[in-house]
């Protein structure tokens, strides 16, 4: 049974991304986002241990090594992260970086600054499509009407 799409973390159900919810692979080959792995990691005997939420296998990371350094990025998921999502994340990061400067000059960062409203030409607004007549499907087999058989000649 699949609990979520393979582009979503099965712990937090967030979409994997290239900035915040980076897909990391445990040693058991199950993938989860980096923030979830950070939350479930435990410090034991000088090592970081992460117990897989699916199969319960323990992945150990030696002392002095961060999870980001020890666990690989799932390249199959990474390659399928939509480019539009990357662009949206980049624009969000830019807006956050510009927020202090805009506050100084009295402006506020909003989505209106980055996404202009689409203006349709008036002829497209008035465009309507004529309704097509409905078609009736008549069964071709198992019909025992003599008129039907004569008509098919």
Image (cartoon, grey):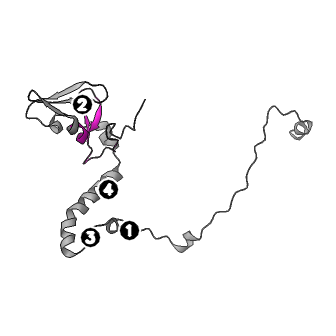
- Judged by depth in the image, the label closer to the viewer, 1 or 2, is 2
Q: In which quarter of the image is residue 31?
A: top left
Q: Is mark 3 on a helix, strand or loop?
A: loop
Decide: marks 1, 3 in contact (CB < 8 A)? Answer: no
- Judged by depth in the image, the label closer to the viewer, 4 or 2, is 2
Decide: marks 4, 2 in contact (CB < 8 A)? Answer: no
Vertical side of 36 occupied by 53: above or below: above
Q: Is residue 15 magenta?
A: yes
Q: Is residue 129 visible?
A: yes
Disc 3 to disc 2, C-alpha distance: 42 Å
- Mark 2 = which residue? 26
* Label at residue 108: 3
Decide: marks 4, 3 in contact (CB < 8 A)? Answer: no
Disc 1 to disc 3, C-alpha distance: 16 Å
- Mark 1 = which residue? 116
Q: How crowded is mark 4: few (under 14 residues within 10 Å), some or many (20 or more)?
A: few
Which residue is found at the position 38% from the left and 68% from the top? Answer: 116
């Amino acid at each position: 049974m699949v609990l979520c799409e393979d582009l979503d973390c099965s712990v937090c159900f967030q979409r994997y991304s290239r900035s915040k919810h980076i897909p990391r692979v445990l040693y058991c080959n199950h993938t989860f986002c980096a923030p979830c792995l950070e939350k479930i990691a435990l410090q034991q005997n000088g090592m970081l241990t992460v117990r897989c939420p699916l199969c319960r296998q323990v992945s150990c990371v030696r002392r002095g090594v961060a999870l980001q350094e020890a666990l690989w990025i799932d390249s199959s998921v990474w390659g399928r992260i939509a480019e539009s999502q990357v662009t949206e994340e980049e624009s969000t990061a830019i807006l956050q970086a510009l927020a202090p400067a805009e506050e100084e000059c009295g402006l506020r960062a909003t989505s209106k600054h980055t996404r202009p409203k689409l203006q349709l030409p008036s002829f497209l607004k008035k465009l309507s499509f004529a309704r097509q007549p409905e078609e009736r499907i008549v069964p071709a087999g198992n019909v025992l009407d003599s008129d039907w058989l004569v008509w098919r000649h």
